[in-house]
Amino acid sequence: IDAFVSKYDSIAETLAASQLNYGGHSRLEIQNFLKEIAQKDKNILGSWVIYEPNAFDNKDNQYKNKVGHDNTGRFLPYWNRLKGEELVVEPVLDADISDFYTVPKETKNVFIPTPYIYEGVLMMSFCYPIVKDNIFKGVAGLDISIETVKKLLLGFDENKIYYRKNLDTDLFR
């Protein structure tokens, strides 16, 4: 399990670091980067960034209701497989009231919340704050469905899954 957590934690950390080191101002480049991350690993349910209002390039007004933005133009693209195998992009919902955003914002530290349900999918997240010159800019993260975690940890062989279920039951009698 350590290797699994380490792998996806490293990808999320790299995603956040890339935001700090990014010198351009292209929202499309960032969205393409997020999509590429999720495309390269089918175990990733979603990759995302959530910026504070106007923190990316101070041009939120120009992006109201555009792809990967909310009705204020805030930049919060979420490339995901929530509804199937095909990747789609949509704005992150309820960021300002969700632990995956508020905790890294408040602590300025990495946060891996307990599994939670988002849009009907039980998932875990790796959430890294984007902090530049001690100023909080946003959060970058990855999501993995708990179903995928189970398959990765137990293997894809149904016999192994059955065996593991019975083993767990036997151990706790």
Image: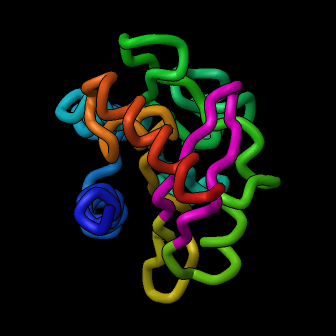
Location of the C terminus by quadrant is bottom right
Q: Residue pushed farthest bottom? A: 134
Residue 110 shows in the view: yes
Q: Residue furthest left?
A: 40
* Residue 112 is covered by the magenta coloring: yes
- Name the quadrant containing residue 112: bottom right
Residue in the foreground of this view, choosing between 55 and 172: 172
Q: Is residue 18 above or below residue 85?
A: below
Q: How many numbered marks, from 0 up? A: 0
Q: Is residue 27 above or below residue 106?
A: above
- At 68% across and 35% down in the image, what residue appears? 118
Is-magenta flag for residue 26?
no
- Residue 32 visible in the snapshot: no
Q: Residue at x 43, y 35 (%)?
A: 46
Residue in view at x 52 percent, y 60 percent: 139
Q: Which residues are magenta?
A: 111-127
Which image quadrant is residue 157 in? top left
Residue 67: x, y in percent?
52, 21
Left or right: residue 20 compared with residue 138: left
Q: Position of residue 155 (x, y in %)?
A: 27, 36
Task: Check the picture and name the quadrant holding the N terminus.
Answer: bottom left
Residue 12's x, y, as percent? 35, 58
Residue closest to the eye, 103 or 166 = 166
The part of the image, by quadrant, that contains residue 135 is bottom right
Could you say where residue 36 lies in the image, as x and y percent from the top left?
A: 22, 33
Going 42% across and 48% down the picture, which residue do you hit? 142
